[in-house]
Amino acid sequence: MAWLQSNRRVQIPTQPRAQARPVLDEDEPIANDDEVAESLNLKSTDRNVTEDQNRDPFMGVKVRRKASFHRDYIGDYLDVPSQPYLMKILEKQGDKKVLFADKVLKFTSSGKMKRRILLMTDFAIYIVDPDIDALKRRIALAAVEKLCLSELSDNFLAIIIPTEYDLLMASTRKTEIVTVLVDATKSQSDYELEVLLSNRFEYNATSELVKEIDFEETEGGVRTRIVRK
């Protein structure tokens, strides 16, 4: 596919490995994959597995967990219609069709993790603070240039928005998020969103602060470092 770029092709390991603790600037620890899943109140599962390979945005390039292969997608994991404050946010923006809704962890410019709700419609991405029921950011799909992920088995995803600043987050449903964004962008504009797979990439934490995230496969799993450029 034209939108898929990768620095190298990696082999899917025959045996699953435990995940090592990633580290942030100056070895400040951040959540590893299992801790992210626990924080988001999500559990991996092997049930509801299908063989729909056409929906795989990684085409065998990215190392993935067994549970993430060809998993049936639900989309709305929060039952948005039953959440009045979420519906109010969408209605105020004129959006109605929810393609995806779930809890994620968003990384701030300082590297801290914040619990957020990610909503995706056929027009925009919404970041909502569930503690105060407030919309923190709305990103038009047309403003997204590309998605950046590692080639390894981790939960990190960067959404690159050149006209603003980028969004780095972690989700145990990253594959579904990527698929929804690619499909929604193509549906609205007939443009295939670029998905870049690399174990080192840069992102704009703010309009003036560039950071680099580096992924390294280790004996214990994946080591992740985020450093200022």
Image (tube, rainbow, N blue to C red):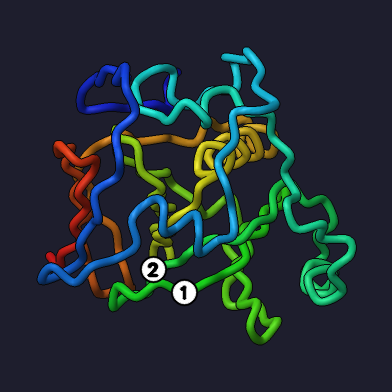
Task: Residue at 59%, 59% (x, y): give it.
Answer: 41
Residue identified by numbered label 1: 114
Residue 48 image point, x, y percent: 70, 26
| Mark 2 neighbour density, 10 Å: few (under 14) some (14–19) many (20 or more) | some
In the image, farthest residue toward the bottom: 132
Which residue type does callout 2 highlight?
Answer: Phe
Residue 135 image point, x, y percent: 65, 77
Which residue type does callout 1 highlight?
Answer: Lys
Residue 118 image point, x, y percent: 61, 60
Residues at discs 2 and 1 in contact (Cβ within 8 Å): yes
Task: Residue at 44%, 58% (x, y): give it.
Answer: 36
Task: Residue at 44%, 18% (x, y): give it.
Answer: 59
Residue 226 image point, x, y percent: 20, 61
Residue identified by numbered label 2: 107
Marks 2/1: CA distance? Answer: 6 Å
Residue 138 shown left or right of residue 203 in the figure = right
